[in-house]
Image (spheres, grey):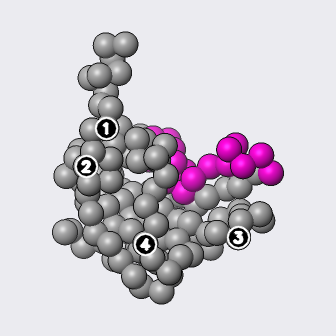
Amino acid sequence: MPDTDDLIEAARAVRLRAYVPYSRFHVGAAIRSASGAVYAGCNVENVAYPEGTCAEAGAIAAMIAGGDTQIAQIAVIADSPDPVSPCGGCRQKIAEFAKGDTPVTLTTTDGARLDTTVSALLPGAFDQDQMSRV
């Protein structure tokens, strides 16, 4: 697994900026794009829960806004005793911009860690070729 210390630190830093007045569940995510740039995002809640934004989606949006389109690595950190997997929607978003063997590091503020891949998180994900045939 490639070194992810800088991604974990970027996710840890942005996690502190999460806007979570309802759940108080802070999540940060950081992406290294294929160009080597690092993009980060935190979760942002809204009183209408489904209208909030996940940290992973925020990091992906920052990556796209930065002009990159390929995730090379991703790290997610959350306030949890165990590593927390991205939600189903974020798993699909990650799969859209990453290859199946792209490393994913899930960690906690206490240092628990799970290293996995995009395919392990979302087996059988839709891909862009399937969607272009719709």
The answer to whether marks 2 and 1 mark residues whose Cβ atoms lie closer than 8 Å is: yes
Whole-number angstrom distance, CA of label 2 to CA of label 1: 8 Å
Q: Which region of the structure is painted magenta?
A: 47-65
The answer to whether marks 3 and 4 mark residues whose Cβ atoms lie closer than 8 Å is: no
Indicate the amino acid at tag 3: Arg
- Most distant residue in the top direction: 134
- Mark 4 burial class by Cα count in 10 Å: few <14, some 14-19, many 20+: many
Indicate the amino acid at tag 1: Ala
Kind of element beneath mark 4: loop
Residue, disc 4: 83
Seen at 34% across and 43% down, the residue is 95
Residue, disc 2: 119
Closer to the camera in the image, 91 or 2: 91
Indicate the amino acid at tag 2: Ser
The part of the image, by quadrant, that contains residue 31 is bottom left
- Most distant residue in the right direction: 47
Residue, disc 3: 24
Whole-number angstrom distance, CA of label 1 to CA of label 3: 30 Å
Closer to the camera in the image, 110 or 73: 110
Residue, disc 1: 125
Q: In the picture, which quadrant includes the C terminus?
A: top left
Regarding residue 62, the answer to whether it shows in the image is no
Which mark sits nearer the N-terminus, 3 or 2? 3
Q: Please provide percent x and percent y for residue 10.
A: 46, 70
| Vertical relation: 90 (above or below) 126 | below
